[in-house]
Amino acid sequence: MDIVEQDMKAAGLPTGFQWGAGKAGIKASGNLDVAVAIAPKMATAAAMFTRNQVVAAPVTVGRRHLAATDGRVGAVLVNAGNANCATGQPGIDACLSTCSAAAETFGCIFDEVFPSSTGIIGVPLPAEKVIAALPKLKDSIGSADEHAELFAQAIMTTDTKKKVARAVVDVDGAEVRIFGAAKGAGMIYPRLGPPHATMLVYIFTDLSATSEELRAALAPAVERSFNCISIDGDTSTNDTVLLLASGASGVKMSDRVREPFENALKLVCASLAHQIVDDGEGVGHVVTLHITGARTEADAKQVATSIAHSPLCKTAWSSADPNWGRLLAAAGYSGVSFNPANVRITIGAQPVFELGVRSEAFNEAAAHAAMSEREYTITIDLGTGHAECRFVTCDLTQEYVKINADYST
């Protein structure tokens, strides 16, 4: 049976890991800004990274390290408040120096350290601050709930709350546990691919699995979760999803274990993805775009993305304005072929557009009431096939503009 909970106390943490966090003085607020996750007996890993052509130094170094160790990770080192992106060779050198210090501190090999950064782009990373914080951080790591909670807290930037999820898979009385922690509130339109304000996701499990097996499980889970959300349409330079398996449960990946584990992983990813949108910068409404009747799932996602990135649609959502014409127009310029005469649009339970014209049952007040809820679904049936997609997005508010107008100053 698969169980997923967002409550930090609801299910046990996966064994074989330790977590911790500290203050390096990178964040002007003085809040926690360095986080570590340690696998004392090593973990296997799979990762997916941003497809942005401009990538941060830790993405470059992380790819190299996973390739060099064949997916073996002993420590994850995350700093928040500085993206270490567009910082040239000095940025790479800074990242490498923090990895070397972490390896020495936590007793692993240099390239068994997986680095991540999040924060402002173009500012040199003060590596010396990260390095100086590591000895004290080592003394505070542990495997209890409070340690995992500190890890989730330290990776936050403009986030207003921690984002965590857990799942347990029962295998003949033995438990395989999954714990995920994520950050992200702005610059969110992940387009994650395999190796070759930011979203960072770290998922830990005590299943025993190879890197290849983890990659096979991670890709479909990411495609229908993190790759199906958008806050503002901006793809970060640092986006990373990392899945680590300690093997400490003693349960090995097998044909019998694979399906329930993959289902639990999908639940954890879906929960974290939804939490990211729900905590989006200035978000007043979380909108699920359910595109049905498409020829292919890719077509459905393309239509959803077009609508999710339309400033006209997003501003209408902010005031609960049932301006369905904007939805139809955004679908029309998406590049997906369909006949408008076959399209049906529903906001919540309210039909608004049917077979080429406004629905006879359209009730503007009822549609406005549906859109006034914190969360609701807009369903668009294209009438061209049987494929569908669910894409989670949000409105665009004055608060979002305020946050990002002054982000670097």
Image: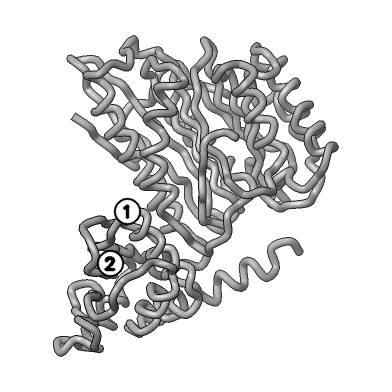
- Choose between 383 and 143: the one closer to the eye: 383
Q: Is residue 117 above or below residue 176?
A: below
Residue 383 figure quarter: bottom left
Q: Which element type, helix, strand or loop, lies under badge 1?
A: helix
Image quadrant holding the C terminus, namely bottom right
Amino acid type of the residue tagged 1 in the rendering: Glu
Q: Residue at x 70, y 25 (%)?
A: 134
Q: Which element type, helix, strand or loop, lies under badge 2?
A: strand
Amino acid type of the residue tagged 2 in the rendering: Thr
- Choose between 294 and 288: the one closer to the eye: 294
Q: Position of residue 108 (x, y in %)?
A: 64, 13
Q: Which mark is residue 297?
A: 1
| CA distance separating discs 1 and 2 | 18 Å
Q: Nearer the viewer, mark 1 or mark 2?
A: 1
> Which residue is labeled 2 in the image?
377
Q: Position of residue 148 (x, y in %)?
A: 48, 31
Disc 2 packing (10 Å; few <14; some 14–19; many ≥20): some
Q: Residue at x 61, y 16 (%)?
A: 69
Q: Residue at x 67, y 70 (%)?
A: 405
Q: Which mark is residue 351?
A: none
Q: Along the horizontal axis of the image, is 263 left or right of 145?
A: left
Disc 1 packing (10 Å; few <14; some 14–19; many ≥20): some
- The mark that comes first in sequence, 1 or 2, is 1
Q: Is residue 358 in view from this perspective?
A: yes
